[in-house]
Image (cartoon, rainbow, N blue to C red):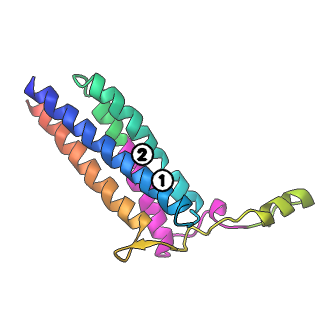
Amino acid sequence: MNKIFEIKKFYILIFIISLLSLLIALYIEFFLGYSPCKLCIYQRVPYLFAIFITFLGINYSKNLIWLYALLITFFSSFLLSGYHFGIEQEFFEEFLGCTNNSLNIIDKNELLKLLSSNVNSCKNVDFKIFGLSLASINLLISFFIFILIFKLILNEKNK
């Protein structure tokens, strides 16, 4: 019974971290007025998945499948934030969705719609906390949570 209680506390911790991450991102966007790039928005998706997985994990904590699902979720978050961080540091080129590139647009209505939309470049860092971009903070958080989940799975398998 104690083991299940500890796993439930872990799911609650992941739920709180995920919810806070999303709320902080939304606060920065809507209350502080910083416009996110496409990758910033994509980086929110694993946290949404993590919230739903933690609900399932809390209710069905005897099954390790939810820990594996969280492991995959935060590994994908780590990869996505690592790619975004690499673009910010100019290790990688921006993908076409990050730029306001209009090379293949033929229709004038599509061109006007593209020009009126404000696509923020993924390599621009508009907001920093303690000198770190949000992508780098997400990279650290995702890696840390991934390692925690990995250790918990190993501990559960060895019991």
Q: Main secondary structure of the magenta part?
A: helix
According to the image, label 1 marks what residue?
A: 43
> Toward the viewer: 120 or 77?
120
Instruction: Say what amino acid the circle numbered 2 marks.
Output: Tyr
Residue 101 at x, y percent in the picture: 73, 67
Q: In what quadrant of the picture does the C terminus appear? A: top left
Name the residue rendered at 21%, 22% in the picture: 62
Name the residue rendered at 49%, 46% in the picture: 45
Name the residue rendered at 21%, 32% in the picture: 8
Residue that protrudes farthest toward the front in the picture? 31
- Asked whether residue 87 is drawn in magenta, I would say yes
Instruction: Say what amino acid the circle numbered 1 marks.
Output: Gln
- Up-down relation of residue 120 to residue 14 (above or below): below
On the rendered structure, is 6 left or right of 134?
A: left
On the rendered structure, is 2 left or right of 98?
A: left
Residue bounds of the magenta highlight: 73-100
Quadrant of the rendered image containing residue 49: top left
Q: Is residue 73 visible?
A: yes
> Toward the viewer: 35 or 64?
35
Name the residue rendered at 55%, 74% in the picture: 124
C-alpha span from label 1 to label 2: 8 Å
According to the image, label 2 marks what residue?
A: 47
> Toward the viewer: 78 or 44?
44
Tell me, yes or no, whether the two marked residues, 1 and 2, touch with CB atoms within 8 Å. Answer: yes
- Asked whether residue 22 is drawn in magenta, I would say no
Quadrant of the rendered image containing residue 37: bottom right
Residue that protrudes farthest toward the right in the picture? 108
| Helix, strand or loop under label 2 | helix
At label 2, counting other C-alpha atoms closer than 10 Å, the crowd grade (few under 14, some 14-19, many 20 or more) is many
- Up-down relation of residue 119 to residue 159 (above or below): below
Quadrant of the rendered image containing residue 133: bottom left
